[in-house]
Structures are given as structure tokens and as C-alpha cells.
Image: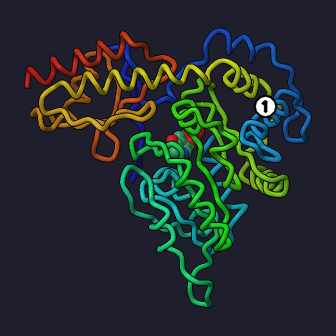
Amino acid sequence: MHYTPAPRDPKATPVRVNLLSDTQTRPTPAMREAMATAEVGDEQIGDDPTVNLLCERVAELLGKEAAVFMPSGTMCNVAATLSYCRPGDEILAHFSAHIIAREGGAHAALGGFQITPLPGPDGQFSPETFRSALHPRSRYQPPQTVVSVEQTANIGGGTIWKKADLDEIAKIAKANGLATHMDGARLLNATVATGINARDMTAGWDSAWIDFSKGLGAPIGGVIAGSSDFIDDVWRWKQRLGGSMRQAGICAAACVYALDHHVDRLAEDHANARALARGLSQLNGVEVQQPETNLVFFRPDGAGVSGDKMVAELRKRGVLLAMMDGRIRACTHLDVTAEMVEETVGLVREIVRGA
Ligand SMILES: *Cc1c(COP(=O)(O)O)cnc(C)c1O
């Protein structure tokens, strides 16, 4: 079947409050200024000074030897598993993981890998669940090569993996010869929320990456870090996937700007998410998962309005959000203010009352 994404409808109410995703952030004027004045070179041959600076900054931030700038977070995940695994290898991840559900089947299509979905609440599996999914090396079972976690767990509700669990899972992985990979699309949300620095949070993890095109507000890019040998492999896969770039310093400058100006402010997004959850949970019949970071999942069915209906009614009133795996997800970010959150709660109340 042919799938066409819904185009922008010019007659639709303009979006005033965009809670769809933190990918919706627009570069600020100051970020655009940093981009416009960036020093650039040829990224593919290692000659773009701004890209090099960004990679050094992220390697340092995550406590790894080296890092590489990628066009997207998805390519960070794909190049990572392609570097670690051979066809037929097994990757272990939570069943709701982005690598399973949202990467177009890349890990199977390009690598021939199988991903074992692990169970557990809130997008996380326990060290015990992980341990019990391991099997001895044998001739007839697939080699278990990588364990992957999402910090924060997106579909799990933007929940934060406890450092103790991350450390324990990494320890078990090492003892069993598995590599450890952290999908850190929102890692800095977790570090800002907990006060644990990124280097400690990723200490047991061979590779970790952060996304710059989400709450950090850059238009494009992710950076993956790991050992120098691993990053060499990732570079080869980046080339093979067509991800090498040229004057990418224009984009890297936005990411460097984000590291300098948009990290600490993630706390505001978390405060806005809590305020949104508080407001929504005061409405009879609206079920809200308490947010730990910037994602708020809720279900209005108990108030007599289906999720789809709520999304459509809010859209008519200029608020954009969407259903995600059976619940509504609202995402706070750089372009969402406390006033917008208050307005959204008011509109949800109005829709519930009219039901
Ligand atoms: C968004 C996201 C990705 C993919 O990042 P892109 O930059 O959109 O390709 C991967 N993992 C998680 C958990 C995400 O939320």
C-alpha cells in the first residue's frame, strides 16, 4: 500500500501550541547566527573544525575516547548495531524500543539482526529480566551480541533508568561478553532531571549517543561516542549508509550552541511537563502518567472522550499533539511556555466538559 504523510492543510487552524514532539523545536535566532558564522571544512575527510569541536565536546561529555557526528539519531543506532553485530546476531532491547518499532526495520533489513523484545513496565527491563534472557553460547542459538537501553525511555513515558540498574545490566552484559549500547536520544533530559552527570550515567556503556534535534533545539544531527576502534567502525558504516557530509559545520555549530545554552534549560521543560500533568490529573476521568522528564502520556477515555477525539478537538483549537501506542503523548520543549501549558489544560477541560 502506498503511504503518503498528511500534508500541511492551509485551511486548518494554525498551530499555536506544538506539543507533538521535541523534534518540532525551531532553531532560535542566536542559534541561526552561530550557524551562519560557523567555520567549516570537508567533514568527510575530518577537516571541518566545527564538527571536530562538537565531536570532542560530546566525547568529553560522555567520557569516551571518540565521537562522530551523524545526520540523525536513527543513523547512530543503525551504524552502532552494524558495527557490533554480524548477520544472525541477537540484540536485546525493551519491546517498546525505538530500534524495534521506529527505524523502518533497519536492523533486520540492513544487518540481518534479530532483536529480542524484553518485557517490563515503563519502557524498562530489570537486570533480572535481562539475566534470564541470556543463554549460553552454543551452536544452535544466535550469538547474543548487544544489549540496548533508551535513556530516557520514550514510549515508557520519558522515564529515567536508575543508574544502579544501568550499572548492573552493564555488569551482567560484560560478564557474558555482550556490548552495551545506550540510545541517549534524551540522555541529557535524564542527567538534568537527576543531577547525575552524563559521564557517570554512561560509564558502563560502550557506546552512547545524544540527539541534538530534539529538546536541545538544533535542526539536525546526533553524535555517537565510544572507543576509538568502535568509532572507526561507525565511520565506515556512516560512509556506507551515505551519511558522510561536507560543510556540516553549519549544522554542528547549532549543536555546539545547544550544548552551551540549551542543556540546563531542559529543567524548564520538565517543570512544564509536571504542570501539565498536574492540571490534567485534576480533570475527572483523565488518567495521567506522572512525568519524570518532558513527556506526558495521558488517556481521556474515562471522561467520555476517546484519545483520537481529544487529539482532533485540540487540533481544531490550535494545539497539536498525537496518539502514541494507545495514549496521547504531549511533549514539552524549547518552544513550549508555561502559558501554553496552562492554555492546553484549559482547552482539555473545555472538551471534557462538553462531552
Ligand atoms: C527520536 C528517537 C530516536 C531517533 O532519533 P532521530 O534523530 O529522530 O532519528 C531514537 N531513539 C529514541 C528513543 C528517540 O526518541
Q: Quadrant of residue 294?
A: top left
Q: Position of residue 80 (x, y in %)?
A: 68, 56
Classify residue 15 by image quadrant.
top left
Q: Which residue does the numbered mark 1 point to in the structure image?
A: 54
Secondary structure type for disc 1: helix
Question: Is residue 136 rendered to the left or right of residue 98?
Answer: right
User: Is 176 located above or below residue 274 in the figure?
Assistant: below
The quadrant the C terminus occupies is: top left
Between 3 and 271, the one lying in front of the other is 271
Q: Residue at x 37, y 13 (%)?
A: 16
Q: Nearer the viewer, residue 251 or 11?
A: 251
User: How many numbered circles does the render carry?
Assistant: 1
Q: Is residue 1 visible?
A: yes
Taking the spot 85% from the left edge, 36% from the top edge, the residue there is: 43
Residue 320's x, y, as percent? Answer: 35, 24
What colour scheme has been applied to the protein in the rendered image? rainbow
Residue 219 rendering spot, x and y as whole percentages:
62, 26
Front residue of this view, candidates 135 and 33: 135
Q: Residues within 10 Å of mark 1 (few under 14, many from 20)?
A: many
Q: Quarter of the image holding residue 259?
A: top right
- Ligand 1 shown in quarter: top right
Residue furthest front in the image: 164
Quarter of the image containing the N terminus?
A: bottom left
In the image, is the residue at mark 1 within 8 Å of ligand 1 by its beta carbon? no
- The disc labelled 1 sits on which kind of residue? Leu
**Where 139 sits versus 286, above or below?**
below
Instruction: Give the left or right position of residue 163, taking residue 6 as reference.
Output: right
With respect to residue 185, does 217 lie above or below? above
- Residue ID at (39%, 13%): 338
Determine the residue positioned at 61% across, 88% down. 138
